[in-house]
Image: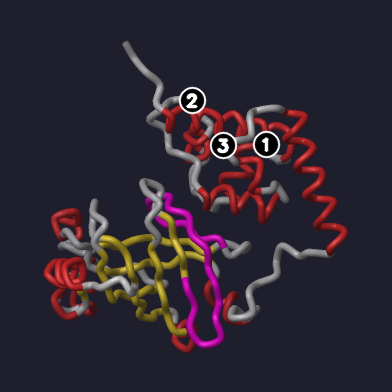
Amino acid sequence: MNHTTKDELQNKLLTKKLNYIIDEYIEGGKEELSVKTFGYARQNQVSNLCSDNPKSTTIKKIHMESIEKHHQIPLSIWDNSLAFEKEKIDQLIQSYRASLKADKISFDDEDSIFSDNKKLFENLKGVWYAYLYPSNPNSAQETEGIWIVETTIHDDYSVVDYWGNAAYLKLGKNQSLIIKEPYENSDLTVIRFSNRHVSFEHFRFTIVSNQNGTTEEMVNFGFYSRKKYSPKEAKEILGDMEKVQLKLNSSFEKRLREKGVVPS
């Protein structure tokens, strides 16, 4: 006998809400949400989110925040404690939009540590290719053990890569960030690069992420380029993997667990 889990019930609730929001509040429907809001290359990424299939991709906070930013849909409607009641959802949305208008809040405002550098953004928009070593080189056997990841930066500062991972671009005064939430989990990947080198159309980056299929962190150095290099050319530029990749030392984590003292 099949039993529906709590997570499955919550995902079904979120899916109902998402379908309702798309039908009632997003002009252009799934295509608008897929391409212009999330920056996905394929509409089926959003179709998966709208499916009742328990194996479909779960709606994540990054999707909710994108819908809030671009379509003025409050995060509160996604709360699992709020049942699927159309009148209540409509009321929350109308109240939220009214408060935005009254307070003159702009959805384009950035935190004070980020900048609005139009010239830099114009140089960043479009397609880039990222080159780096994965934690498991066997996952990139066809490209000589390196990842070549096509990445697109859209007009609304959203970023999407070849695998459909959604991200945000944040421009700092001297360095900028791409903050990514992989579609298969909620672990953040952070890519940092220097603004000074962007105009060269090839620049290095530092990426902090988890090793494949684990919660163990790693630091990788790689580079972005407008040019699509052959795997051999890219590997020559990257050099030895041991010199551009640092994985979490398990003995360090063990020492921290054993010797770390909580202040009394």
**Which residue is more in the foreground, 43 or 201?**
43
**Which residue is more in the foreground, 24 or 155?**
24
Q: Quadrant of the C terminus?
A: bottom left
Amino acid type of the residue tagged 1 in the rendering: Ile
Q: Is residue 191 left or right of residue 104?
A: left
Is 64 within the magenta? Answer: no
Numbered label tally: 3
**Which residue is more in the foreground, 214 or 254?**
254
Magenta residues, start to end: 158-177
**Residue at image mark 3:** 80
Could you tell which of marks 1 and 3 lies nearer the N-terminus? Answer: 1
Label 1 – label 3 distance at C-alpha: 16 Å
**Residue at image mark 2:** 52
Q: Is residue 85 left or right of residue 80?
A: right
Amino acid type of the residue tagged 2 in the rendering: Asp
Asked if the residues shown at circle 1 and circle 3 are in contact, with their CB atoms under 8 angstroms apart, the answer is: no
